[in-house]
Amino acid sequence: MLTVSGLSLRFGDKKLFEDVNLKFTPGNCYGVIGANGAGKSTFLKVLSGEVDSNSGHVSFGKDLRMSVLKQDHYEYDEFKVLDTVVRGNERLFAINEEMNALYMKEDFNDDDGMRIAELQGEYAELGGWESESDAANLLQGLGIDSSFHDKLMSELTGAEKIKVLLAQALFGSPDILILDEPTNHLDIKSINWLEEFLINFEGTVIVVSHDRHFLNKVCTHICDVDFGKIKLFVGNYDFWYESSQLLNRLAKDQNRKKEEQIKELQAFIARFSANASKSKQATSRKKSLDKINLEEMEASSRRYPFVGFKPERQPGNDILMVEGLTKTIDGVKVLDNVSFMVGKDDKIAFVGDEIAVTTLFKILNEEIKPDAGTFKFGVTITTAYFPKDNSEFFQGSELSLVDWLRQYSKDQTESYLRGFLGRMLFSGEEALKNAAVLSGGEKVRCMLSRMMMNDANLLMLDQPTNHLDLESITALNNGLRDFTSNVLFASHDHQFIQTIANRIIDIQPDGSIVDKSTTYDEYLDMKLGA
């Protein structure tokens, strides 16, 4: 068990959280959520001892081992991949190093023999004799082939290093596992493998993630960083979100009888109590859910931007026809004779090779030309495009946000522009910020504002969820789900794809496509089951 008692942390005048008292128990997975800047990652650093709190303390049994997902991707560049994973258990690695040093001694004596016997006993208890095979299995599960295991970390790509560091954190059956954004840069197979690993993990998991599907799949509890506090709720992310939205609605309607409010909340809890992430947790979760009442749960203080797209006109029957598109980038054919038609009401998620997907979007928006093939939009179609790289829209800009947005607005009045920015969480003085100094998430919200002003009936978005917090992802998700016309998009967010797309186009490594009219989950079942 990991216990947090009276924990408080401030940075200057800014209070992140205070008087936090929590218990994290084995067999459970705790998802830490909160708005950007709320202190989620900092809280993990306090738990791991990397950052000192102003008051309070974190404690766990002296015989328990904590493992943390490292964020420095260059820390182990001089080590082999397999050794890097085994270093996840530093004691085990140190024992092995000491034994090897003793075996290499030229003046080996009886004392050395006795020391090796002691070390071998501890080594066996820690699973040392199986350590290399265990490490190899973790790497294989995360998609790192055995041909890489003896390479130096410096020889790997950034995405491959992330997988190795994740394997390092999981290695050796730690008692407490601290993971900050573990799904970043993982492919679908690796994420599925990680989900199953954590669902069956017997220790304590504490994780920060922007991946809602991942949080729903693995989490038994949610730690909500809000109001300068950290509160613990039983259930996954969807349960927390729906509860929060319900409480917000109830808070706005003070005339309703409290009995009716409680009845509505209890009905909601009853629906969710069967949706346990782990079947073995279902009974204990139901008991905890039965105890929830309005006094224990506060409506969230978080703000959600308004994201809504309204087409100026509905499209005709001809939307988009693509015939034989072919493109080679740096000697690699990323698109090979790609052909498809977009039908009315199609919302298509493009998955597979990212370079190929981005290349396709750039061709459709005439940023680059294909080597061969053609495409044609219907005469009724107007488009709006969200590029993967938005830097050119902000680089060197001296404009305030109001003036930046004015470039794309039919209504040039200050009141309209400020009202629009306010709905996108740029209110008051924030609307006068220089566009060039915005954060990644703020730039995305500006680009979405630009799209909304277009009134287009065909939207194209290449990785729009990058840099967004959970609140903005949820708002964009709902906006595209409710959009009444066509959407072509790419995203790493599983739930985003599942809840928006009714058709999947998977661009294969050879540049060809697989085109299925189905949901994302159904497509993955077909693909992974093949």
Image: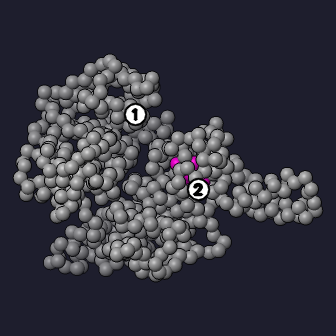
Q: In front here: 82 or 475?
A: 82
Q: Amino acid at mark 1?
A: Ile
**Which residue in the structure is indicated by mark 1?**
355
Give residue 170's mark.
Answer: 2
- Residue 145: give x, y in percent of width and height: 60, 39
Residue 217 sits above or below residue 18 on the image: above
Amino acid type, mark 2 = Leu
Report helix, strand or loop for mark 2.
helix
Residue occupying image coordinates x 59% and y 56%: 170
Distance, label 1 to label 2, CA atoms, is: 30 Å
Comparing marks 1 and 2, which lies closer to the viewer? 1
The range drawn in magenta is 162-170
Left or right side of 342 for 454: left
Quadrant containing the N terminus in the rendered view: bottom right
Does dot 1 land on a helix, a strand or a loop?
Answer: helix
Q: Residue at the location (40% across, 62% down)? A: 236
